[in-house]
Amino acid sequence: MDAYDAWVRGRVSASRYRHTLGVVKAARRLAEIHRCDVEKASAAAFCHDAAKGMPKDALLSKAEEGRWPLDWVDRMRPDLLHGPVAAILCYEELGIRDEDILNAIRYHTTGRPDMSLLEQIVYLADLIEEGRDFPELPRLRKLAEQDLTETLTEAFDLILRFILESGDLIHPTTIHARNWYRTKINANKEEESMIGQ
């Protein structure tokens, strides 16, 4: 972890590094609770924002160089590419080959349907780390310790509302992720009601 820490510290601002440490702490806690590999959660959390400070043209260029499939939203909002680009940098500069770690880094901003346990943990750790502050946060923190699927569903709804209110573009992968988790929650509720009959 020291190597990841030093590498990230050299790439990001002081405030982004503080956020990163908060994400590492939250990811480790969620990994322990949900029986996920704590070291993999730490590695992905340390590296998730490694490309956050890159200029937009550099993000686009690195994504193209790394053969990341770009759509028009990526081109309009290159800042959303900091996850995929961070994964490319981790592969090239740190030698990380674990696809689960790389995916957790790639999708920590947009999410995606059917995320692995590690991906879910890093996505939520980024949202609920101790440096964040928004009204729904206490409920999400508590819920994340109990039910990741339900937390993700609520988190996607919350994020989409925020993006709509800001008037910004919504990445299609986030919409697909929200719909996938909403469908899963609805199916679970139907199953529970049938069992209760």
Image (cartoon, rainbow, N blue to C red):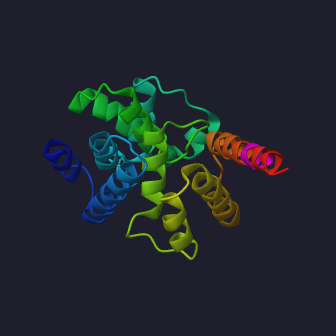
Instruction: Give the residue drawn at x 39%, y 37%.
Output: 85
Q: Position of residue 115 (x, y in %)?
A: 54, 37
Residue 17 falls in image quadrant = bottom left
**Figure check: 197 above or below 101:** below
Instruction: Give the residue drawn at x 44%, y 48%.
Output: 121
Depth check, front residue: 117 or 18: 117
Depth check, front residue: 164 or 160: 160
**Quarter of the image with the N terminus in it:** top left
Q: Position of residue 173 (x, y in %)?
A: 63, 39
Depth check, front residue: 136 or 149: 149
Query: In the visual, does 70 lie left or right of 84?
Result: right
Instruction: Give the residue drawn at x 49%, y 36%.
Output: 116
Depth check, front residue: 51 or 186: 186
Q: Position of residue 37 (x, y in %)?
A: 33, 40
Is residue 78 one of those drawn in magenta? no
**From which residue to which does the magenta span run?**
186-190
Query: In the visual, does 118 lie left or right of 37?
Result: right
Quick one: which residue is furthest to the bottom in this view?
135
